[in-house]
Amino acid sequence: MTDNDLGAKIAAAAEMILASRRLVVFTGAGISTESGIPDFRGPGGIWTRFDPDDFTIQKFLRSEETRRKQWKILIEGGLFSNVRPNRAHLAIAELEEIGKLNCIITQNIDNLHQKAGNSPDRIFELHGNMQWVKCLDCDERYTVEYIKKKLKSGIEVPECEMCHGILKPDVVFFGEMLPTEVLDAATAYSMHCDLFLVVGSSLVVQPAALMPAYAKEAGARLIIVNIGDTPYDSQADILIEGKAGDVMSKIVEKVREKT
């Protein structure tokens, strides 16, 4: 793609956003790699370093040793604790600030949209949020930082202080259903949007990958910003292959110029 082609696509994407009244942004791992978080399935990703079988909900529930191992990996390992939002996250936050964002649907668990400044009530996290820990018995929630202090004090497998139930990072493990309320809301927003913007997702993980299909079936336009192919490329009104930070910052700059 030449610079002229890229410039034309960025300008066209900005015009679509300006014309939109119900914009949904859908983000995947590709938006956060520029913040230093490897794609879970890519080179250097977590599944190249750890056994995915240790992250099944069944094994977590039945084995205290598995829970001990997971707390060490997920908490003491500092996963996501020091990462910062990049230009793509900040650009999406600016879309909300200027009144052009209906909601964000994300596959990511890194809390970076919140850190960038997006309103939590506009963010639907299909796979949970690594900044929180919840009790599987009474639903009491704790911050990761609070649980870290417990671990550093010598507790290897923390339990709920309210009911002594099993605590679990508030993310979706293998074999676990996506949170129904979040999935239903994401589906509804997708079915009622007029523009669906994908940023950094290969759109292959189900059921999250159904969201652009719902949007297209409802007559929405589709913009895809991603490195690599997706199953929806042929349905995209605008397809831009490039780094999320580069592309989104340029698109939002064009939007800002005309608002």
Image (cartoon, rainbow, N blue to C red):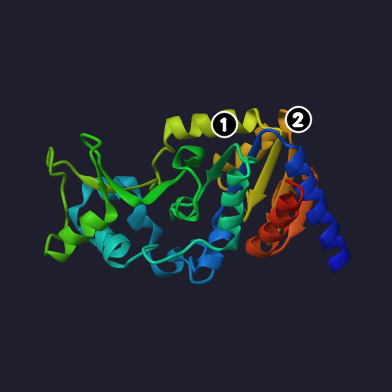
- Please report the residue visible at 55 percent of the width from the left and 63 percent of the height from the top: 86
Q: Residue 94's x, y, as percent? A: 60, 51
Across and down, in percent, residue 237 comes to: 80, 44
Quadrant of the rendering where the C terminus is positioned: top right
Residue named by callout 1: 187
Q: Amino acid at mark 1?
A: Thr
Q: Amino acid at mark 2?
A: Gly
Decide if residue 2 is in sight here: no
> What is the x, y in percent for residue 35?
51, 66
Spatial CA span between label 1 and label 2: 14 Å
Which of these two is toward me, 178 or 108? 108
Residue at x 65%, y 48% (from the top left corner): 198
Q: Are there few (<14), some (14-19), or many (20+) residues within 10 Å of tag 2? A: some
Looking at the image, residue 233 sits to the left or right of residue 113; the answer is right
Decide if residue 230 is on the left or right side of residue 164. Answer: right
How many numbered circles does the render carry? Answer: 2
Q: Is residue 4 above or below residue 10?
A: below
Per the image, label 2 sits on a secondary structure element best described as loop
At horizontal 29% and vertical 50% (from top left) the residue drawn is: 59
* Residue 43 tag number: none
Return the x and y of residue 112 as percentages of the image width and height: 47, 55
Q: Quadrant of the N terminus?
A: bottom right
The residue at 71%/33% (across/down) is 194
> Which residue corresponds to mark 2?
219
Can you see residue 18?
yes
Q: Is residue 173 left or right of residue 243?
A: left
Q: Which badge, 1 or 2, comes first in the chain's sequence? A: 1
Q: Is residue 96 above or below residue 179?
A: below
